[in-house]
Amino acid sequence: MAFAAHEVVINKDAMTVFQFLMDGTNNSLWRSGVRSISLRSGIRGEKGAVYQQTLTGPGGRPIAADFKITDARPGAEVRFEVVNGPAKPTGGYYLSTEGATTRLRFALEYHPKGLQKLMNGMIQKTMESEVAQLERLKTVIEARSAA
């Protein structure tokens, strides 16, 4: 199993952060590997929405990584699962209010099967890199609402 998590404190309220995260099309604003993303089905920003996403994979090749919002608790949690692609991790954003700020934790989990188990080290590093991009999310959200 591969697991990675990262946490930041954002100088915005939890509902502002929650609403930004619920719109999957915002991923391209803070995740460097996102080549394209669009709403495939459902309603943007709501539980059940499926986003079609293409990422930059090994060697710069495009890979599918479509995901679905599986659970949402306003101001507290957004959970998702990857539904299309070579790896199908699950993950979530967990928010807690701390005065006028929001503590945000991003966690990913993946259970490789078959030959993918041999690549666990590479999978682990990739997941750690993904959750570390939360630092960029903090910058983007704070800059957007300041403008």
Image (cartoon, rainbow, N blue to C red):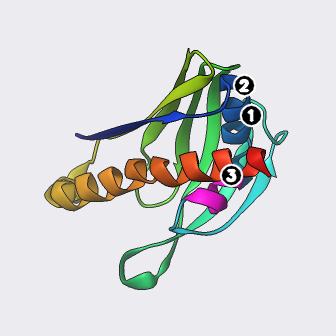
For disc 2, the marked residue is 15
* Badge number at residue 103: none
CA neighbours of label 1 inside 10 A, class few (<14), some (14 to 19), many (20+): some
**Residue 28 within the segment the image draws in magenta:** yes
Please determine whether, in this image, residue 42 is positioned above or below residue 35.
above
CA neighbours of label 2 inside 10 A, class few (<14), some (14 to 19), many (20+): some
Task: Say what amino acid the circle numbered 3 marks.
Answer: Ala
Tag 2 and tag 3, C-beta contact below 8 Å? no
- Magenta residues: mostly which secondary structure? helix
Q: CA distance from mark 2 to mark 3?
A: 16 Å
Q: Earlier in the sequence, mark 2 or mark 3?
A: 2
In this rendered view, identify the residue nearer to me: 28 or 91.
28
The location of residue 90, given as percent across then percent down, is 45, 38
Tag 1 and tag 2, C-beta contact below 8 Å? yes
Q: Is residue 47 left or right of residue 123?
A: right
Kindly identify the residue that appears in the image at 44 percent across and 83 percent down. Answer: 60
Q: Is residue 33 left or right of residue 144?
A: left
For disc 3, the marked residue is 143
Tag 1 and tag 3, C-beta contact below 8 Å? no
In this rendered view, identify the residue nearer to me: 119 or 75.
75
Give the residues in magenta: 26-30
CA neighbours of label 3 inside 10 A, class few (<14), some (14 to 19), many (20+): few
Task: Say what amino acid the circle numbered 2 marks.
Answer: Met
SS for callout 3: helix
The location of residue 27, given as percent across then percent down, is 63, 55
SS for callout 2: helix
Please determine whether, in this image, residue 86 is positioned above or below residue 4.
below
The location of residue 24, given as percent across then percent down, is 69, 48
For disc 1, the marked residue is 19
Kindly identify the residue that appears in the image at 63 percent across and 21 percent down. Answer: 100
